[in-house]
Amino acid sequence: MPLKDRMLNDLWYKNAIVYCLSVGTFMDANGDGVGDFQGLLRRLDYLQGLGVTTIWLMPFQPSPGRDNGYDISDYYNVDPKYGTLGDFSEFTHACRERGLRVMIDLVVNHTSDQHPWFREARSDPDSQYRDWYVWSDKQPPNAKDGVVFPGVQKSTWTFDKQAKRWYFHRFYEFQPDLNTANPYVRAELLKIMGFWIQLGVSGFRMDAVPFVIATKGPKVREPVEQYDMLREFREFLQWRQGDAIILAEANVLPDTDLEYFGDEGERLQMMFNFQLNQNTFYALATGDTAPLKKALTATRPRPATAQWGVFLRNHDELDLGRLTPEQREAVFAAFAPEPDMQLYERGIRRRLAPMLAGDRRRLELAYSLMLTLPGTPVFRYGDEIGMGDDLRLPERECARTPMQWSTEPEGGFTKHAKPPCRVITGGAYGFERVNVASQRRDPNSFLNWMERMIRMRREVPEISWGDFDVLRTSRSDVLALRFDWRNNSVLCLHNFGAEACTVKFRSGCNEPGQNRLINLLSDEHSEEQDDGRHAVVLEPYGYRWYRVGGLDYLLRRSEI
Ligand code: NOJ
């Protein structure tokens, strides 16, 4: 094996399976109605059994909790409702024992307005913290521009009575932006990373990266991203701990992807692929895979050490802002026809299972696809049992209800009779019908299907490591992807159509006798036909994962 390849094996995040959870809604051990680290500790064997390799914790630091913890008031502690720093280090230790990696959210675009830095900054003009935030003497002319939560957030500048000045906040008014142009702020940011690395984490999901690195201030009309900052973060992390990484939340256009990764991979190791996400939902809604294929091609260039984070739904709304208005309307019509299911004039606030009407075939299609798109799959807790949402809750809270463990009261999440965040009860998605314990006993459950799929995905490193091609097929509603790595190839088919179909395609390997497609999930393999093509019959929403027999594929790439 060439030396370079051997070293690449060290990049753990390339073949990881990430599972995102919030401590407060996962498992409550002390019965106070709020999930905690002790509860999470008791569920680590479950996560290990599911096959995930990395746990991403949403913010758990002290916070007034006005944006689900994304308004932090102390970066160096654990919110007492979740436990102590001691519990946290027990948790990272227990993860290490099981071979699980831990990532945490790094929310440094802004603090809570209750953070001592902001309190001091607003009350004392001579404080060193005054310049840690972004101020203006007058209301800037563009104060109403650039809101992230249209319909809820009114402006990006708010007058502070104490400071008698306006402060900038890209998000809600209780989240003042940090002035990342200030070198002391950046030094503190590194210190925060260093602190949590010391306590055993392997990386950070960095919140709102384009805004962290943008120029900010009353005179800034068009913010400009300071990409070099990313290199600074990356270098610091790697000096401290060689295998630590940053996964960026950056919903940006493909032509800036390499600015984030760095041409030589010298900036961030991972980014969520929002392009694939939005176009996947368009394909799921309409059966038209053309825009998804385009997004695949557009986001293909990346350095060998870089990796996409591939996801379906997360803790936020499904943001469809990058689709055309017609495409967005098509997704709304299919998955969120009621205004109450939509959010911020651009997205959908539902969980995936209700969006797909609980249709097992479509759920399997969606997750099979997520597991086989180029990148590292990122699950959200409850995905594995098909959890639903509670649309009576405001904004994004509807998709953040407690994990449903069993048929016990409150779904086994807590012994508290009335927890502040209620588990979903009754109906098709209530804990009585959708829970881990029942699905564990049923060999055909969604949970057991997911476990098998995750297991297989981990055994197919071609998807994580390899290069890919979008293959030409006879049908526009079928996506055929082929991954190649170290003379091995894997070919995946997904039928987005509601009808059964026969799809014809060439595998791309022309060596006689090496063109057999070996089904990885069942006994039904595919032989090449006389015309050199394969013809596979797919069920409505059917999918296949094959290993390809031939080896010379790289000599003959097929293009879409
Ligand atoms: C992105 C996070 O995903 C979202 O939940 C949060 O509201 C904003 N950043 C502000 O931190």
Image: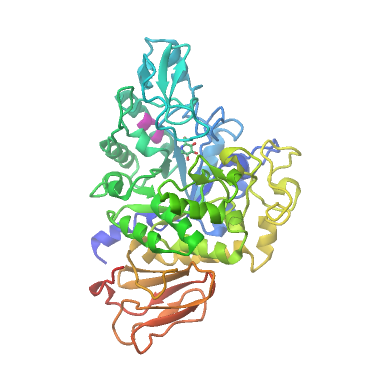
Residue 358 image offset from top left, x and y in percent: 62, 60
- Residue shown at the point (51%, 56%) measured from the top left: 52
For residue 130, above or below residue 2: above
Q: What residue sits 37% from the left and 15% below the top?
A: 138
Q: Relative to residue 393, is residue 366 depicted above or below?
A: below
Q: Is residue 100 visible?
A: no
- The span shown in magenta is 189-193
Residue 198 part of the magenta segment: no
Q: Residue at x 33, y 83 (%)?
A: 514
Q: Nearer the viewer, residue 50 or 156?
A: 156
Q: Nearer the viewer, residue 242 or 119?
A: 119
Q: Position of residue 465 (x, y in %)?
A: 34, 61
Instruction: From the viewer's side, name the closer residue of 97 and 449.
Output: 449
Task: Check the image and name the residue furthest to the bottom.
Answer: 530
Q: Quarter of the image holding residue 204?
A: top left
Residues 60 and 345: in front is 345
29 on left or right of 137: right
Q: Residue at x 28, y 49 (%)?
A: 255
Quadrant in which the N terminus appears: bottom left
Horizontal arrangement in the rendering, residue 34 relative to residue 510 (left or right) = right
